[in-house]
Amino acid sequence: MSTDESPPPGDDEERYRRLLDETEHDTELGLEMGRDAQRVSAGELSELEFYRRYHDRIVEEFDIDDREIDLPDPDEAEPDDVGFLDRIGSALEGIDPDGEESRRSVMKKGAAAAGAMAVGTWGSAQTAAGQDDGHGGGAGADEGDGTRWGMTINLNNCDGCLACMVACNQEHNLSRGANWMYVFAFEDEGQGDETNFLPRTCQHCTDSPCTKVCPVGARHTRSEDGLVLTDYDICIGCRYCEVSCPYGVNYFQWGEPDVPESEVDDAHQIDDRGRWVGSRPPEGVMGKCTFCVDRQDGQMGEEKIGTTACEEACAMDAIHFGDLNDSESPPNQHLREYREGQENDLSEFPNRKAHTASTFKLMEERGTEPNVRFVGNEPSPHAEQVEGPVAYEDMGLTDDRKEVLDEGASATQGGESA
Amino acid sequence: MSVDVSGVDRETLVRPIQTFSKRYLAALAVGLGLIGVWLAFYLQQLQHGLIVTNLSDWGSGGGVPWGLYIGAFIWWVGIAHGGIILSAAVRLLGMDTYQPVARLAELLTIAALTCAGLFILIHVGRPDRLVTSVVPAWPTRVQWSPLMWDVTVITAYFVLTATYLALTIRYDIHRLRDRLPNLLDPLYDVLMIGYSEKEDEVVERMVWWIAFAIIIMAPLLLHGGVIPWLFALLPSMAGWAGGVQGPSFLSIALTSAVSGIIIVAAAFRTAYGWEELIPDAVFRGLSQWLGFFSLIFLWLQLQQVITGIFAAPTTLQHATEVKIATPLYWVAIGLVALAMLYAFAASLRPELFSIRTMVALSVGVLAGTLAEKVLFVVEGLQHAHFALYDGVPGAYVPSPTELSALLGTIGIVVLFFLVVSKVIPVVELHAIEDDHEEVSP
Ligand code: SF4
Ligand code: SF4
Ligand code: SF4
């Protein structure tokens, strides 16, 4: 669902009740909180009282992990702290005790509570309704609060030069064959021998199977911006995330990494929460595209926030990275411009789509809610990978990692790496 | 069909404990040898990482990230799960015929669960973190990750089986203490802490309830649930999805377990001249069960093949077509079918039956179920819904390191039975003495 379309604001309690009932959490709690929130905004109830009234029940309901959020201490909470409800909102957003699924339901809950608030003077119904699908932004949060990094990749622009793959491999010190970015060249039925291209990153799915199945919570969704990351300190290397991901974007570190630890800077590895999630994984641990988490955390300078190495390397303007919750971000802008350039004739057929541009998300029917959108033709089930104009080897890349691993396996005596 | 083995004396029962033979030493050497081979390979893996296996990444990586280790893990869990179900059924339904092999089945469960756990340990990239990562994550992850369900349920079954075994062993040790080696007295003292004859009746009731719990939970746990769910719930691979996996896994578990019990029971019978203690009738009965479970196994395979090729979704159809084009799959099916046919033929014409043949066919069944399970994992991975990768059907042949682990775990089971049979009676006293007579000093 696109973020700039939001359902019409509703103001009846029934609607929020239904919204809340969809979550697995206590409906009454949500509704009560919503009502009391209105009283807070009307000045009938102090914020401190509001906090005290619900703190225990929130903890009980959502089993808050205090590492990840900071609810204000009731004794320290400033009674006239205006941003207080916002903080409750973002606290709800930050709750991430057991992965994405629960985060989603908490979001729905929080969003619905915020929606109920919106009936009064607080917030906007749009914030609430826009969160129905559990995406990014938090309940009652300001626009800027709910970052959801994502991409629009325009396949019509891609010429298969593989520059993005090279850039990603270099920036993240990847071992040979661990192609976090992978560019397919393929031919499809009904398209003759025309070659199409599909650059594939991790889709940073909002409803990601990989985070659900991880037995130890190493694979997780960063609540502040929806990045799907792997905590290299926790991962046990079971590879369950890899078999559960429908896109085949995970690359395990089977042996010693090609680039040793001493050559990788901490700033690229440790994110703003202090967790080791960036650059290539150590041996025995899972890796995949991080949406350049170090860039998004400002470790490579302010100007690199909201950019990725692959996007920067693409001379064809195929990759557009940014905050999908921000309608002015490059991915949203590109999509809009592209669509506007292909307007449909609505004069005679007013019920047609406004544009003729073909867009898709990869295997959306798997229910993963990918955060990468493509412009262009989706490969059919009969599409076949072919050799592109530029060979992987010519760019110093390894396509089939198995070859490297086999070498390594037979040369273990010499401590060969891969 | 009931057999009376109550004429057998206690001497016969404790024969493994009181004798010592060259054959025993030879078996011990084989067991230790197998473990040694595996350890030598495993040290390589510890040193260099999983690169020494033939695994790779699926997708552009041209291989499979799960292979023999996971296939063998499932196989051992299946043997374990089936073993405990059979022993519980014997207790619950009073199937006295099989009482002589009930404890063997429980012991097999313990040994097989140990092997399954070992396969998890050697499968993961960071075995050093198994405790430090899994324990703190347990409370928040157990409701999400099927792998965490597995770890939990396997641990629970291990505890359940060990308790079950410990409870019933106390009765025997108390009554056979004078025939057990003095050397192990400290061990028996520990096992017998707080024992009084009054507990026998209570224990019998407890054992009945544990058996009841095992049977009730069987369709949900291990091969009835968490193990197939490890695959069936994923959105990624066509060949894994579907509700048929639960029943299908359970049928494999029971088939493998009966085969395992036939082999172990025959080994003890031959080694200790236990023709009276484990009479022919036990094997005839077990082989009928094997035939019946094999039939269900084959029926469920048929279900999968038919639904997979007749107007199935593209990826599932492809996965099924490849499966039925794989010779190894038909070898596996053939081995199970052969055992089934023999078992049925022998029940119609009893003179056809021989324990030796049955043991050979059981070995075949175990090979077949192992092959089927490894294929399930590997071929499952080779047919992703996202089929664009040229490398998706990457080739996979287990490396020597991986194969050695299979030998190692078989060695562990051999060693386990050799050691345990020297310590406790592997056939329970109840099998030869129906009544709860008082101890005769
Ligand atoms: S693409 Fe795969 S690895 Fe990435 S978030 Fe989605 S499921 Fe997880
Ligand atoms: S490989 Fe690591 S990140 Fe992936 S599921 Fe296993 S523990 Fe989690
Ligand atoms: S977003 Fe970053 S990590 Fe992901 S493919 Fe592009 S360069 Fe690589």
Image: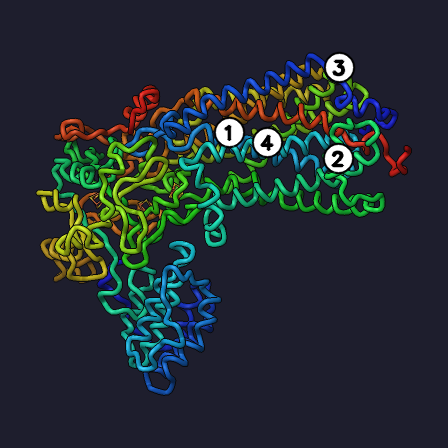
Q: Which residue is mark 4?
A: B112
Closer to the N terminus: mark 2 or mark 3? Answer: 2
- The amino acid on which the numbered mark 1 sits, given as a three-letter code, is Ala
The residue pinned by badge 3 equals: B351
Q: Nearer the viewer, mark 4 or mark 1?
A: 4
Q: Are marks 4 and 3 in contact (CB under 8 Å)?
A: no
If the picture is divided into quarters, which one holds ligand 1? top left
Find disc 1 in the rendering and name its residue: B72
Display coloring: rainbow
Q: Amino acid at mark 4?
A: Ala
Chain name for mark 4: B
Question: Between marks 4 and 1, how big is the CA–CA gap?
Answer: 11 Å
Q: Nearer the viewer, mark 2 or mark 3?
A: 2
Nearer mark to the viewer, of 4 and 2: 2
Nearest to the observer: residue B242 or residue B32: B32
Percent position (x, y) of residue B371?
50, 25
The chain to which mark 1 is attached is B
Residue drawn where x is 30% and y is 71% of the image: A140
How far apart marks 4 and 3 lie (CA) works out to 33 Å
Residue B299 visible in the displayed image: no
Dot 3 and dot 1 within a common chain: yes
Among numbered discs 1 and 2, the one appearing first in the sequence: 1
Which residue lies under the disc numbered 2? B188
**Residue A394 percent across, percent down from the top left:** 14, 27
Quadrant (top left, top right, bottom left, bottom right) of the C terminus of chain B: top right
* Closer to the eye: label 3 or 1: 1
Same chain letter for marks 4 and 2: yes
Spatial CA span between label 1 and label 2 = 34 Å
Figure quadrant of residue A281: top left
Q: In the displayed structure, would residue B58 be above or below residue B7?
A: below
Instruction: Name which of mark 3 and mark 1 comes first in the sequence.
Output: 1
